[in-house]
Image (spheres, helix red, strand yellow):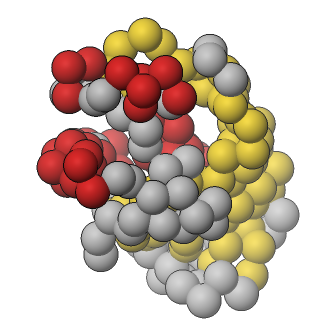
Amino acid sequence: MTRSSGGPRGAQWPEALSAVAAELDAHFRSNPYLKHLGGEIESWGLGWARTMLTPTDDLANIVGTAHGGVVAGLADCAFEVACNSYGRVCVAAELSVHFLAPSRIGKALVAEAREIGRSTRLASYEVNVKEDVGGSRPVATLLALAYRTERWHLGPERYPDDWRTRH
């Protein structure tokens, strides 16, 4: 699976920054927590991301379904990529989770995060988690708030002034 140049919002990385986008892609895909869960980044673009995993028996809760922490963790990883997708270092300030249905062991989960608002310091995201790759069964929905720092992944000199101003 690869980084996408467009997505739910249609925003695209400019060709002049394709090398930066490729380095960010490698950085995002090296996420140790997502690897620990057995998940992966399916795709991402400016302001959005999709992660996926298939829960195994060792990720079950005491009733035999995927642990809520796994569902929330997968969603948080999608949120993490989406809010950092412009290259600005962002961290979570708040995350609220609403579980809609149990997630079954052995059934693929897909979490899709999309930006719903962004200012200089804060950005809001909606994250939906569905079971099955086709996204047929809602499992959870999350609202997430990111704090946008002054720091830039790969260093600020890698981004043109107008990019840093807009993003």
**Residue 16: where, in percent of width, then height?**
24, 49
Above or below: residue 135 compared with residue 9: below
**Residue 156: where, in percent of width, then height?**
26, 19
Left or right, 155 with reference to 134: left
Residue ID at (62%, 17%): 120
Foreground of the two, 6 or 161: 161
**Residue 8: where, in percent of width, then height?**
62, 66
Count of labels in the image: 0
* Residue 54 position by quadrant: bottom left
Left or right, 17 with reference to 88: left
Residue ID at (75%, 45%): 116
Which quadrant, please, contains the N terminus? bottom left
Above or below: residue 50 compared with residue 13: below
Task: Answer yes or no: is residue 108 visible.
Answer: yes
**Residue 105: where, in percent of width, then height?**
53, 77
* Residue 48 position by quadrant: bottom right
